[in-house]
Image (cartoon, helix red, strand yellow):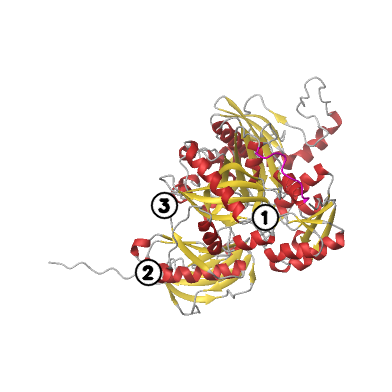
Amino acid sequence: MRRDVIHSLLVANRGEIACRVFRTCRDLGITTVAVYSDADADALHVREADLAVRLPGAAPADTYLRGDLVVAAALAAGADAVHPGYGFLSENAGFAAAVQEAGLVWVGPPVKAIELMASKTRAKELMAGAGVPLLAPVYPATAGEDDLPLLLKAAAGGGGRGMRIVRELGALPRELEAASAEAASAFGDGEVFAEPYVERGRHVEVQVMADAHDTVWALGTRDCSLQRRHQKVIEEAPAPGLDDSLRERLHEAAVAAARAVGYRGAGTVEFLVSAEGRPYFLEMNTRLQVEHPVTEAVFGLDLVALQLRVAEGEPLPAPTPPQPSGHAVEARLYAEDPARDWQPQTGTLLALEVPDAPGLRLDAGYAGGDTIGVHYDPMLAKVIAHAPTRPEAVRLLARALERARIHGPVTNRDLLVRSLRHPDFAAARLDTGFYDRHLAVLTAPGPGDPATAALAAALAAAVRRTAPAQAARTGARAEAVRPATGAVQPGALAAGGPPPVRFGAWRNVPSGPQLKRYRGEPDGAEHEVAYRTPRTGAPEPYEAPGVRVLAVRPDHVTLELDGVTRHFTVTTAPGADRVHVDTPGASYTFTALPRFTDPATHTAPGSLLAPMPGTVVRVADGLAAGAAVEAGQPLIWLEAMKMEHRILAPASGTLTALHAVPGHQVEVGALLAVVQEDPAPAPVPEETA
């Protein structure tokens, strides 16, 4: 059999997965090649690669989805192999064939296997012949009340695009049309099929690894039930709560699926497991999954290294996989606001720091200082925890996320921490409706103390303003830092910046209070802080019983709250009014507010503003100025970060202006339309006797 030794590898992808593949290549001594769009010119995966080739443009259709350009890039850089990552062209049979036709090694499954599994409808027919358990198909044209609820899915889809749940028969035609339109936009194929929607079902999958020597490994199970918009958020291995017979049945079905298509490389067979414990085949993903690290942690494997080994024609290391050990949980960190319909967020990521500890792993696609744009998926990183038991792994992951420093756009970090600590998750009561039931609780204001965090921000800001003057007065008399303790005495100038100001107790000074106003993000709550700054330049809170200031620096504040010492790390965004306050148990973001509100910042009542930068993909049929609209009616569809977002009418009334035009790019806050609410009916006088 032919052996193709890989010396240089191009990753036909971006972000986290490209960085992850490069990490294994470095360990194996393989030269790495990145491709990048104009929007990714300074992206992390480009900085980490040995070589990089530009794909002109920004939109995926012009760059990462252009197989011809990617193949040309590999040849230009002298690569001898291509790894597709996940998403984009990873399950495109034509691209796989083009790579091989160019004389390059394809680090993926055979073209025929990709073709057979590319259409979910054809894949189900093939699996039925292999004895894999399936849900009975439902034909929308003949569907009746007894078939509800239904799940509509794009035949060529993935990642939740083109999926709809239908609970009312009258809504079926409309949802079919919407699902088909989204599928055509996302995949270039509008075919949609229907199957029964299993209430309280679990999403359980089996990782397979196969070589060209007739060996197929079933590498345990993963539970991926916690999903938003049919996209996974938290995954774990092994899937908890499965009995041995069900686990064995899933393994056997996954191996049968892989053998049915002559599979090679890494793949995943996905199942829906009903509340009664019956498994049903969903699809086979002919690529590496986002959640593969939990399997790597449990089995002690590097799946990318095994992909490369199989692509070079080598057999798997043994006829059977190694024994699993412990439990692993992964959380996907997204730049999105779960409390606002999961809206993706853009902007500069000022900091992304996750504690380093045994059992923790960070797979990131961004670093501090990077820009999160509008063109791609909003996932920033994956945080993985591995421990001997599930409770230990969950605890380790929740604490790591809680202590992480993440500054910039709003993220789902708090949601992840609360999800991991939710009683249903702790008890492994898992199903795909988890967020449908618990989202309101998981996104409600938490038990933290934002008011005290705002106080710390105000005290740090006051020191930052007074530090230059204080330094000028005391610089000539600055005391040295004590070598034994590292403590800086009041008035000393530390080499790293302005000195800390330490307090033994409150000071009674005649200066009047100053006010500082902050708006918390993302809840919008306002906090007003009163403090005084005496002639020494040392700020102290005003009328704050139980609060004692121990030390203040521009970047750190130590307070004693009712006898308990607490530390606050304060970071101010350069040239901005935003400030980030991190504590060991919570993090807060504030925007400093002016003392007086500018009336010019108000918009007209009924104004519909773009909640994020994006592209207007369509407007409601017949929508024009003067049209009557109903409260909650979808009016405009925006696409941003691979997701569609509906702009709804805020009230019943008349559309007085429409500025949204399909195909146009809009910035956050752009005026899309204006709805004038119908006047409330005049009260009818009560009849008198």
Nearer to us: label 2 or label 1: 1
Say if mark 3 contacts mark 2, CB within 8 Å. no
Residue at (38, 61) in percent of width and height: 148
Residue range corresponding to the magenta coloring:
312-321
Q: Which residue is mark 2?
A: 170
Nearer to us: label 3 or label 2: 3
Q: Is residue 409 visible?
A: yes
Q: Reply yes or no: does residue 450 show up in magenta.
A: no
- Label 3: element kind: loop
Q: Earlier in the sequence, mark 1 or mark 3?
A: 1
Q: Which mark is residue 199?
A: 3
User: Which residue type carries mark 2?
Assistant: Gly
Task: Tell me the distance, in whole angstroms, between the alpha carbons under discs 2 and 1.
Answer: 37 Å
Q: Which mark is residue 213?
A: none
Task: Tell me the distance, in whole angstroms, between the alpha carbons under discs 3 and 2.
Answer: 20 Å
Q: Which residue is mark 1?
A: 86
Establish if 483 lies above or below 305.
above
User: Which residue type carries mark 3?
Assistant: Glu
Q: Earlier in the sequence, mark 3 or mark 2?
A: 2
Residue at (72, 31) in percent of width and height: 501
- Label 1: element kind: loop
Mark 2 neighbour density, 10 Å: few (under 14) some (14–19) many (20 or more):
few
Task: Tell me the distance, in whole angstroms, between the alpha carbons under discs 1 and 3.
Answer: 28 Å
Q: Quadrant of the rendered structure where residue 397 is?
A: top right
In this view, the residue farthest toward the left is 689
Counting every numbered tag in the picture gives: 3
- Label 2: element kind: helix
Give percent across and percent down for residue 309: 76, 46
Left or right of residue 532, residue 315 in this image: right
Say if mark 1 contacts mark 3, CB within 8 Å. no
Q: Earlier in the sequence, mark 2 or mark 1?
A: 1
Give percent across and percent down for residue 670: 60, 67
